[in-house]
Image: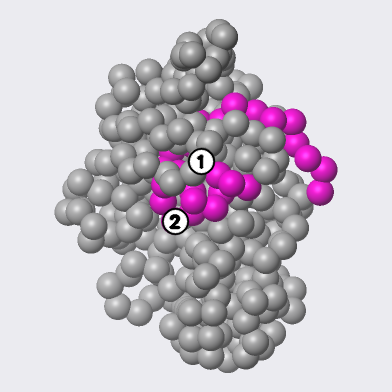
């Protein structure tokens, strides 16, 4: 895959589960990254600026900050590094699920931080903003009791109708993104509906259970995203210009099933219609749009690491 031209990227929430892998991928593609988080990222070259994203003033200030303390003049540097405009913002920071804080705080924190990030980026002239939405918006992951999906595959035009606070906050983020993209023509704002993030060490630990007990994976639509492949999706979004507001499912191509996808769905979910022919092992939370529009190519399918 061709290397991208390096960009100056502000990444929020880079100290979290996904960010710990996405940021190194972005660095490998030649980008410079400043991490905005409340917790430091243990990385030798990426600086973490402690930032409360629910404070709009802090967000505006952080977006015009130096990328590292070493960019100030000191005995090891003959001159300062000027603060330059940033090229892109990738916003992953959020309360990551329900029940970390009370529901109203989850909603307030997630929606307000996303609004502040998008507003600051647009008003500062940043032309590329990528925000983290979620698989939960499809309405099954955090339902109370068993729920069925409306149809398969789950694609970006699906009528999302979650009942929980976390997923609702993510849909509000998507609506904010759409609004600002309309208000600021020429700005690309892409929302990634991120699947269940899998880190490299989790394949051996967790995936045998996922694969051998598929009934436990309905809430994730038998889909997942390798944290490194999520990095590729983010890089491709940085490179892809001119799309305005877009939603992409950020998942791996391959399902977490041992059997062909349509075979399993017809047997396990007989009341849910299948609206198109699916690939033999295509994830029901389909990344077809990311493959066709962004050029995503899965590099880390689970069966590369797990034998069952």
What residue appears at the point 75 percent right and 58 percent down from the top-left corner?
297
| Circle 2: element type | loop
Where does residue 40 sit, x and y in percent of width and height?
37, 42
Q: Is 262 displayed left or right of 172 in the figure?
A: right
What residue appears at the point 38 percent right and 30 percent down from the top-left corner?
49
N-terminal of the two: label 2 or label 1? 2
Q: Relative to 151, is 177 above or below?
A: above
Q: Relative to 262, is 132 above or below?
A: above
Gap in angstroms between the C-alphas marked 2 and 1: 18 Å
Q: Is 12 displayed left or right of 306 in the figure?
A: left
Q: Is 95 displayed left or right of 213 in the figure?
A: left
To which quarter of the image does residue 300 belong?
A: bottom right
What residue appears at the point 62 percent right and 42 percent down from the top-left corner?
26
Which contiguous range is marked in magenta? 1-25
Where does residue 213 sit, x and y in percent of width and height?
49, 89
Q: On the image, numbered disc 1 is attached to which residue?
A: 44
Q: Residue 226: within the magenta? A: no
- Asked whether residue 132 appears in the rendered view, the answer is no
To which quarter of the image does residue 291 belong?
A: bottom right
Q: Relative to 203, is 116 above or below?
A: above
Label 2: few (<14), some (14–19) or many (≥20) C-alpha neighbours in 10 Å: some
What residue appears at the point 70 percent right and 40 percent down from the top-left corner?
29
């Amino acid at each position: 895959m061709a290397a991208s031209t390096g960009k100056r990227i502000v990444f929020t929430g880079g100290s979290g589960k996904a960010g710990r892998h996405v940021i190194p991928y972005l660095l490998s593609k030649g980008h410079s990254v400043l991490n905005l988080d409340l917790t430091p990222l243990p990385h030798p070259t990426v600086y973490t600026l402690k930032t409360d994203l629910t404070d709009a003033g802090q967000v505006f200030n952080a977006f015009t900050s130096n990328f590292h303390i070493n960019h100030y003049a000191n005995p090891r540097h003959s001159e300062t590094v000027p603060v330059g405009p940033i090229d892109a913002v990738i916003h992953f920071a959020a309360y990551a699920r329900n029940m970390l804080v009370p529901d109203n705080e989850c909603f307030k924190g997630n929606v307000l931080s996303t609004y502040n990030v998008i507003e600051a980026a647009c008003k500062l002239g940043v032309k590329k903003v990528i925000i983290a939405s979620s698989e939960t918006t499809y309405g099954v992951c955090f339902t109370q009791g068993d729920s069925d999906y409306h149809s398969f595959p789950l694609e970006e035009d699906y009528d999302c109708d979650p009942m929980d606070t976390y997923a609702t906050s993510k849909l509000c983020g998507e609506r904010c993104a759409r609004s600002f993209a309309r208000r600021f023509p020429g700005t690309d704002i892409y929302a990634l509906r991120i699947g269940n993030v899998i880190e490299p060490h989790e394949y051996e630990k967790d995936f045998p259970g996922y694969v051998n007990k598929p009934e436990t994976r309905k809430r994730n639509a038998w889909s997942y995203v390798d944290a490194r492949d999520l990095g590729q999706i983010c890089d491709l979004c940085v490179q892809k210009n001119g799309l305005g507001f877009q939603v992409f499912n950020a998942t791996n191509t391959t399902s977490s099933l041992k059997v062909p996808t349509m075979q399993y769905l017809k047997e396990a979910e007989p009341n849910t219609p299948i609206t198109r022919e699916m690939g033999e092992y295509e994830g029901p939370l389909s990344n077809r749009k990311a493959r066709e529009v962004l050029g995503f190519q899965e590099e880390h399918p689970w069966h590369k690491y797990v034998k069952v």
